[in-house]
C-alpha cells in the first residue's frame, strides 16, 4: 500500500507541475445544477415524463379586414382545457399588438441612442414624433352565459379574472370582441406584420399575424408565461384547433394557415380547375392566379365582400395574408400517408424570381426537414412575398427578398431562397417542436438554422453556407458585450443576437454531428429529440439530455462550454519534440546482457523551432523491480525495444488558450509528401484544462504538424496551429511585395 501511495503521489506532483497557478474550472463536471432537474413531468432521459401535461386552447374566430380604414374587427370564442394538476382562478392572454401603442412601456429598445446623421425614420423609432394608431380595443369579455368577465391589461398581457376557478381536468369557453388598427410595416421597428402599400397602383398587401388575443402558455416549469412582448423575443403558445372565417374585399386572394373549406364560394371555375391540377403536379408549380389576372384585380378594387373559411388542426397559432395583388402558384409534395400543397403568393413586383424559385424552395425545405426530423404533417406550406424581414407561422411564412425592376443580384437571390427555406423550416422549430421563443430564442432559431443549412448544402451546393469558420469573427470579438447562448432573447444586444442565437448554436450542432458524435449516431439522436417533443413544449434540458441519452456520449463538457460561457476555441501547438530510438553499439561482453536502446530527442533542453537539428539523444533504461510493484509477471522489455527501434517518436504539447475544450485533430505531413490524421477526444483535457502532452510513434519522419487542419472546431487563431511556425510577413515586407 505504501508503494501505491508513493506512485499516486508522484503522478499528482507531475500533474500539479503542469497546472500550478491555474484555477480549476470544472469543464468536465456535470451540468445537472445548471439545468432543470428531472421529475415525473420531464424524465432524466430527456423524454416527456409519465405525468407530462400541457394545456390546450381551441379557437372559433370571425374577422373582418376593413381595407378602407385599415382595421381588423373580430370576435373569438376560446375553449380552454386545464390539463394541469392546478386549479386556476385567472388566465393570461397575450395582446402583442399593444407593443406599438405610444404609451406602451419600453422594456429596453434595440436602438435607443441618438447619433450623428440619423435618418428621419430612425428618429421616429426613438421619439414617436408622429403617433400612428396601434393597439387593441377590447370590446367585451364574457362567459358562455353571456356574463361579463373582469380583466386587467398589463401592456402586452391581459389577465382574465374568472368568475369561478377552473378546476384541474375541466375546460371553459369564453368570448372576446376586439379590434385594432393594422400598422404600416415601414413605420415600426422590427415589425413582422402589418400592411405594405404600393402607391404605383394604389393597392395594399396585408400580412396579418399575432392579430387576435391568444392564450399564454401555462406549463410545469414556470406556470404562466409572464414575459412581455418586446419585439425581439417572440411567442410561447398552446396547441389547439382553429375555425376561422375571414371576410375581405371580393377581389382579394387569401393565403392562410389551415385548409380552405369553401373553395367553390371564393374561387372561380378556372381557379378551381387549376388548384385541382396543382394537387396532382409533383414536378412543377401550377399557376392558380396569373400575373394578368392579378393586374386585373388591382384595377377592379371591388367594394363587395366575401368570406374565406379555414380550419386548422393541432397548431399553436394562425396567420393569413390578403391582397388583390397576389399571383398564386402551387405544387404537390408526396409524403408517406398524405400530400401537401407547397404554395407561393406574391405581387407582380416579385417577378420573375419568385415564380421561378419560391415554391421550389418550399418543396426543398419540406423534403430535407422531413428526412432530418419527421414528415411534415400539415396540408399546406405557404411562402408569401414581402419587402423585408422573414417571419414564420404554422403552414405560412412571410419572406423578404424582392427584385428591383425585375432584376436581382446573385447574393440577393441566395438570401431570398435561404430566407424561404429558413422560414418554412420554422414549421418544425418552434411551430411543432414548440419551444418558448421569448425565453430561449436559440432553441427555435439555432436548431432551425442547423437544418436550414443542411438544406442549402444538399439542395443548393453552389450557395454559401454556414460552417464552423463562419462563427470565428463573433467568437473572437469583444468579450465585454458578449452573452452566452443560454441568455433570454430580450437580454441580448440587437447587434449580437443573430450570431449568438442563430449562428453559434448551428455551428455547435454541426461540430457534434460531423466531428464529435458522428453523423449516423447524431442524426438518430436528433430525430429522437424531434419525435419526443413534437406538439409539446421542450426546454434546453430536454434537448441536452436526449442527445446524451440517444448517443451514449457524455456531452456535458460541450454544452457547458458552448452554451453557458463566452469562451472561444483557440488551441496552440506549443511544442513538438522529436525522438528516435536505435540500438546502442556495445562490446561483446555487454551484448551478452540485455540489449540497451537510446532515444534521441530534438532540443531536449528547450523548445525547437523546427526539425532541422535532428533528434536529440537520451537513454531508455531497463525497468527496475520496484517499478513492477508486487507483480510477478514482467513486460517483455527487449520486445518493446525491438518494436520502437528505428521509429520516430513525437511528443506534442498543446495549450488551451481560448478556454473552450474540444477534441484535438492533428495532421502529420511526412518527408515523402504523404500525410496522416490522428484524432484525440475532448476528454484528453480532463486532468489539465490548460495544457496537454501526447506521444505519437511514426514510421516516417515528419516535416510539419498542424492542428485542426480542416477547420472543424472554429479555432479563432490558426496562426498558432502549425509546427514549424509559419513566419508571417511584417507590414513593411507586405508593402514591399506589393510594390
Image: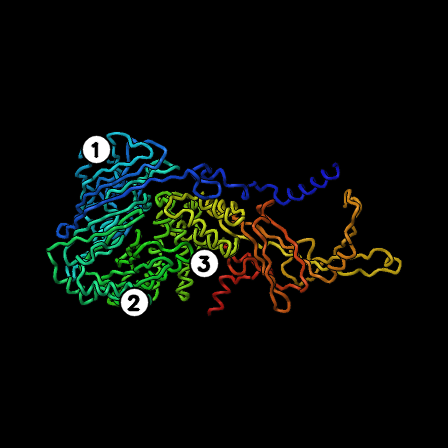
Report the residue at 48% width, 44% height from top.
Answer: 545
Furthest residue toward top? 164
Disc marking residue 356:
2
How far apart marks 3 and 1 lie (CA) works out to 54 Å
How far apart marks 2 and 1 lie (CA) works out to 52 Å
Residue under pointer 1: 149
Residue 180 sits in which quadrant? top left
Residue 578 sits in which quadrant? bottom right
Q: Nearer the viewer, mark 2 or mark 3?
A: 2
Depth check: give the residue in front, 135 or 94: 94
Depth check: give the residue in front, 54 or 234: 54
Q: N-terminal of the two: label 3 or label 1?
A: 1
Furthest residue toward right? 589
Residue under pointer 3: 467
Residue 154 visible? The answer is no
Q: What secondary structure is marked by label 3?
A: loop
Tag 3: Cα neighbours inside 10 Å, few (<14), some, or many (≥20)?
A: some
Report the residue at 43% width, 51% height from top.
Answer: 505
Amino acid at each position: 500500500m505504501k508503494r501505491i501511495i508513493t506512485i499516486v503521489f508522484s503522478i499528482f506532483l507531475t500533474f500539479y507541475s503542469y497546472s500550478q497557478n491555474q484555477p480549476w474550472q470544472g469543464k468536465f463536471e456535470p451540468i445537472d445544477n445548471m439545468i432543470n432537474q428531472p421529475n415525473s413531468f420531464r424524465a432524466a432521459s430527456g423524454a416527456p415524463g409519465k405525468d407530462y401535461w400541457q394545456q390546450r386552447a381551441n379557437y372559433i374566430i370571425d374577422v373582418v379586414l376593413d381595407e378602407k380604414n385599415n382595421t381588423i374587427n373580430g370576435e373569438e370564442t376560446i375553449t380552454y382545457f386545464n390539463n394541469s394538476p392546478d386549479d386556476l382562478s385567472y388566465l393570461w392572454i397575450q395582446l402583442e399588438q399593444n407593443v406599438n401603442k405610444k404609451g406602451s412601456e419600453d422594456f429596453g429598445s434595440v436602438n435607443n441612442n441618438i447619433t450623428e446623421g440619423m435618418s428621419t425614420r430612425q428618429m421616429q423609432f426613438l421619439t414617436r414624433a408622429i403617433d400612428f394608431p396601434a393597439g387593441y380595443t377590447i370590446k367585451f369579455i364574457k362567459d358562455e352565459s353571456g356574463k361579463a368577465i373582469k380583466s386587467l391589461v398589463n401592456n402586452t398581457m391581459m389577465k382574465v379574472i374568472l368568475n369561478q376557478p377552473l378546476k384541474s381536468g375541466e375546460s371553459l369557453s369564453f368570448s372576446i370582441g376586439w379590434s385594432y388598427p393594422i400598422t404600416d410595416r415601414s413605420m415600426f421597428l422590427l415589425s413582422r406584420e402589418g400592411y405594405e402599400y404600393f402607391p404605383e397602383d394604389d393597392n395594399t398587401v396585408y400580412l396579418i399575424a399575432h392579430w387576435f388575443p391568444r392564450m399564454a402558455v401555462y406549463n410545469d416549469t414556470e406556470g404562466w408565461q409572464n414575459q412581455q412582448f418586446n419585439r425581439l423575443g417572440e411567442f410561447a403558445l398552446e396547441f389547439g384547433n382553429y375555425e376561422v372565417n375571414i371576410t375581405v374585399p371580393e377581389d382579394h386572394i387569401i393565403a392562410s394557415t389551415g385548409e380552405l373549406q369553401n373553395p367553390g364560394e371564393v374561387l372561380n371555375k378556372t381557379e378551381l380547375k387549376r388548384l385541382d391540377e396543382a394537387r396532382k403536379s409533383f414536378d412543377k408549380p401550377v399557376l392558380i392566379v396569373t400575373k394578368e389576372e392579378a393586374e386585373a384585380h388591382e384595377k377592379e378594387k371591388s367594394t363587395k365582400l366575401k368570406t374565406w373559411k379555414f380550419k386548422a388542426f393541432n397548431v399553436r397559432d394562425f396567420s393569413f395574408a390578403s391582397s388583390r395583388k397576389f399571383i398564386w402558384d402551387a405544387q404537390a409534395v408526396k409524403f408517406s400517408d398524405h400530400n401537401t400543397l407547397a404554395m407561393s403568393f406574391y405581387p407582380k413586383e416579385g417577378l420573375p424570381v419568385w415564380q421561378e424559385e419560391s415554391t421550389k424552395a418550399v418543396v426543398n425545405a419540406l423534403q430535407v426537414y422531413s428526412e432530418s426530423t419527421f414528415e411534415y404533417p400539415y396540408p399546406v406550406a405557404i411562402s408569401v412575398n414581402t419587402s423585408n424581414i422573414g417571419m414564420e407561422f404554422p403552414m405560412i411564412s412571410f419572406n423578404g427578398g424582392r427584385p428591383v425592376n425585375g432584376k436581382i443580384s446573385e447574393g440577393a437571390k441566395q438570401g431570398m431562397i435561404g430566407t424561404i427555406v429558413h422560414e418554412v423550416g420554422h414549421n418544425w422549430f418552434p411551430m411543432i417542436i414548440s419551444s418558448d421563443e421569448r425565453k430561449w430564442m436559440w432553441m427555435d432559431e439555432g436548431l432551425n438554422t442547423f437544418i436550414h443549412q443542411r438544406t442549402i448544402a444538399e439542395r443548393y451546393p453552389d450557395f454559401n453556407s454556414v460552417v464552423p469558420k463562419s462563427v470565428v469573427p463573433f467568437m473572437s470579438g469583444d468579450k465585454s458585450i458578449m452573452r452566452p447562448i443560454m441568455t433570454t432573447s430580450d437580454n441580448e444586444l440587437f447587434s449580437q443576437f443573430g450570431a449568438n442565437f442563430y449562428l453559434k448554436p448551428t455551428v455547435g450542432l454541426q461540430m457534434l454531428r460531423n466531428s464529435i458524435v458522428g453523423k449516423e449516431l447524431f442524426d438518430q439522436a436528433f430525430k429522437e429529440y424531434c419525435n419526443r417533443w413534437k406538439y409539446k413544449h421542450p426546454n434546453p434540458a430536454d434537448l441536452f439530455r436526449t442527445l446524451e441519452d440517444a448517443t451514449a456520449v457524455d456531452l456535458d463538457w460541450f454544452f457547458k462550454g458552448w452554451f453557458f460561457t463566452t469562451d472561444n476555441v483557440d488551441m496552440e501547438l506549443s511544442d513538438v519534440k522529436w525522438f528516435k530510438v536505435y540500438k546502442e553499439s556495445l562490446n561483446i561482453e555487454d551484448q551478452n546482457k540485455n540489449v540497451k536502446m537510446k532515444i534521441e530527442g530534438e532540443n531536449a533542453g528547450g523548445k525547437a523551432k523546427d526539425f532541422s537539428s535532428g533528434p536529440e539523444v537520451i537513454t531508455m533504461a531497463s525497468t527496475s523491480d520496484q517499478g513492477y510493484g508486487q507483480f510477478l509477471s514482467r513486460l517483455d522489455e527487449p520486445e518493446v525495444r525491438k518494436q520502437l527501434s528505428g521509429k520516430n517518436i513525437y511528443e506534442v504539447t498543446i495549450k488551451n488558450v481560448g478556454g473552450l475544450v474540444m477534441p484535438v485533430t492533428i495532421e502529420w505531413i511526412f518527408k515523402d509528401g504523404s500525410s496522416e490524421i490522428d484524432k484525440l477526444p475532448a476528454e484528453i483535457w480532463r486532468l489539465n484544462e490548460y495544457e496537454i502532452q501526447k506521444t505519437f510513434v511514426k514510421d516516417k519522419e515528419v516535416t510539419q504538424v498542424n492542428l485542426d487542419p480542416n477547420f472543424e472546431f472554429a479555432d479563432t487563431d490558426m496562426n498558432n496551429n502549425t509546427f514549424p511556425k509559419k513566419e508571417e510577413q511584417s507590414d513593411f515586407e507586405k508593402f514591399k511585395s506589393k510594390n
